[in-house]
């Protein structure tokens, strides 16, 4: 269950589905920061809690997320010591 505390600030949100033998899931991941303590955490919004707009944007977000992870991975490889 997605928990949002009064001191939380949403840093980013991204779609990342998962699949395996006999199962599949399309969670929406939310990165939050407590703006008082600076502590960051990740929460998950399950498909049954998605809005119609989240459902409409899910594939776009997942595709952008995959591309960004790929590009950042290239940078990381170049800078690995």
Image (cartoon, rainbow, N blue to C red):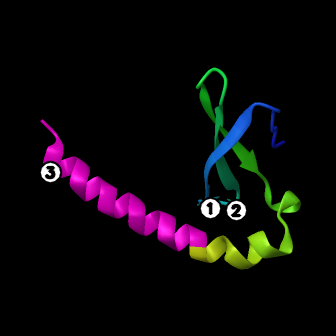
Q: Is residue 62 on the magenta stretch?
A: yes
Q: Decide: few, some or many residues near mark 2? Use Cα within 10 Å; few <14, some 14-19, many ≥20.
A: many
Where residue 4 sits in the image (x, y, percent)? 81, 38
Which numbered disc covers residue 17?
1
Question: Answer yes or no: do the residues labelled 2 and 3 have beta carbons within 8 Å?
Answer: no
The residue at which mark 3 appears reads as 78
Q: Which residues are magenta?
A: 61-81
Residue extending furthest toward the top: 37
Quick check: 81 left or right of 70?
left
* Image height of 57 relative to 4, above or below: below
Q: Is residue 71 left or right of residue 56?
A: left
The residue furthest front is 36
Label disc, if present, on residue 26 of the rendered structure? 2
Q: State yes or no: residue 4 in magenta.
A: no
Q: Which residue is depicted at the point 67% across and 71% down?
A: 58
Q: Are marks 3 and 1 in contact (CB under 8 Å)?
A: no
Q: Nearer the viewer, residue 27 or 34?
A: 34
């Amino acid at each position: 269950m997605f928990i949002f505390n009064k001191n939380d600030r949403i840093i980013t949100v991204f779609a990342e589905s998962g699949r395996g033998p006999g199962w599949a899931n399309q969670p929406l991941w939310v990165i939050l920061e407590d703006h008082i303590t600076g502590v960051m955490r990740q929460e998950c919004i399950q498909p049954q809690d998605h809005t119609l707009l989240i459902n409409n944007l899910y594939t776009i977000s997942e595709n952008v997320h995959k591309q960004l992870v790929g590009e950042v991975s290239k940078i990381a490889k170049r800078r690995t010591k």
